């Protein structure tokens, strides 16, 4: 074989390898986009409104198909798999500004009558047991001052939810802006896959380390 012919073969092989890499990258990108649009999306927790369930710096995965499948970049549902349940931790478009994503816990379902009396939550006149809820402020604010500790009763409209943060005294939630349209749900949070403590240090103590090792892999409920 001539030197020219050998060079042509090497060029052909080089182009073939580059094409394979390019195709693999394109397929990987498309697969990632499909997964993000229909299956799972990652979110980072920026505030303490869900403490102690979720801490600032927790990175979570949200199932986008728990309640159904939507047309990407819209709130139009293609397939329905079920409805949110009381106690679910959900990510949704903030009703006041849909460009922002919020995460809270479902408290009231469509048709429920919700009342808050001295920090206690009542659904349909029944006191709700809430082991996940915490209160950092001993003061009780009257309804005339704020809906934080006393509110309602209010009735959740059809196809809507009433949501609250677990950190009750430091959460801006449905008590202030009422309801979330079910169509605005992004999905249900189900696991912490990474947790970074920006105020941590280099130590083996998980509670004080930059990386909160004891939170990685924690299932959310």
Image (cartoon, helix red, strand yellow):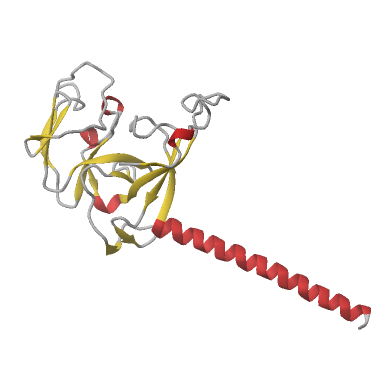
Quadrant hosting residue 117: top left
Across and down, in percent, residue 123 comes to 11, 38
Across and down, in percent, residue 200 comes to 52, 25
Q: From the viewer's perspective, is 132 left or right of 101? A: left
* Closest to the observer, 175 or 84: 84
Identified at 21% across, 16% down, the residue is 139
Identified at 20% across, 38% down, the residue is 178
Q: From the viewer's perspective, is 219 left or right of 205? A: left
Residue 62 in the image: above or below residue 133 = below
Residue 170 in the image: above or below residue 28 = above
Across and down, in percent, residue 185 comes to 30, 50
In the image as oriented, which residue stretches furthest toward the right? 2
Q: From the viewer's perspective, is 8 left or right of 24? A: right
Identified at 27% across, 44% down, the residue is 88
In which quadrant is the N terminus drawn? bottom right
In which quadrant is the C terminus drawn? top left
Residue 66 in the image: above or below residue 201 = below
In the image as oriented, which residue stretches furthest toward the left? 125
Count the marks: how many?
Answer: 0
């Amino acid at each position: 074989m001539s030197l020219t012919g050998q060079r042509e073969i090497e060029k052909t092989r080089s182009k073939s390898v580059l094409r394979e890499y390019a195709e693999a990258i394109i397929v990987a990108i498309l697969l990632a986009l499909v997964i993000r649009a229909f299956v799972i999306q990652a979110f980072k927790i920026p505030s303490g409104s869900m403490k102690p369930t979720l801490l600032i710096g927790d990175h979570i995965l949200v199932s986008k198909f728990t309640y159904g499948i939507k047309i990407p970049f819209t709130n139009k549902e293609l397939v329905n798999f079920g409805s949110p349940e009381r106690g679910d931790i959900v990510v949704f478009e903030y009703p006041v500004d849909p460009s922002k994503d919020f995460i809270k816990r479902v408290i009231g379902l469509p048709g429920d009558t919700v009342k808050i009396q001295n920090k206690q939550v009542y659904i349909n006149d029944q006191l709700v047991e809430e082991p996940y809820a915490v209160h950092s402020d001993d003061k009780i604010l009257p309804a005339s001052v704020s809906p934080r500790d006393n509110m309602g009763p209010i009735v959740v409209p059809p196809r809507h939810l009433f949501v609250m943060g677990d950190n009750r005294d430091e959460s801006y939630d449905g008590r202030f802006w009422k309801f979330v349209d079910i169509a605005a749900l992004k999905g249900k949070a189900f696991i912490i896959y990474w947790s970074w403590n920006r105020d941590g240090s280099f130590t083996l103590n998980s509670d004080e380390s930059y990386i909160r090792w004891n939170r990685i892999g924690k299932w959310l409920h």
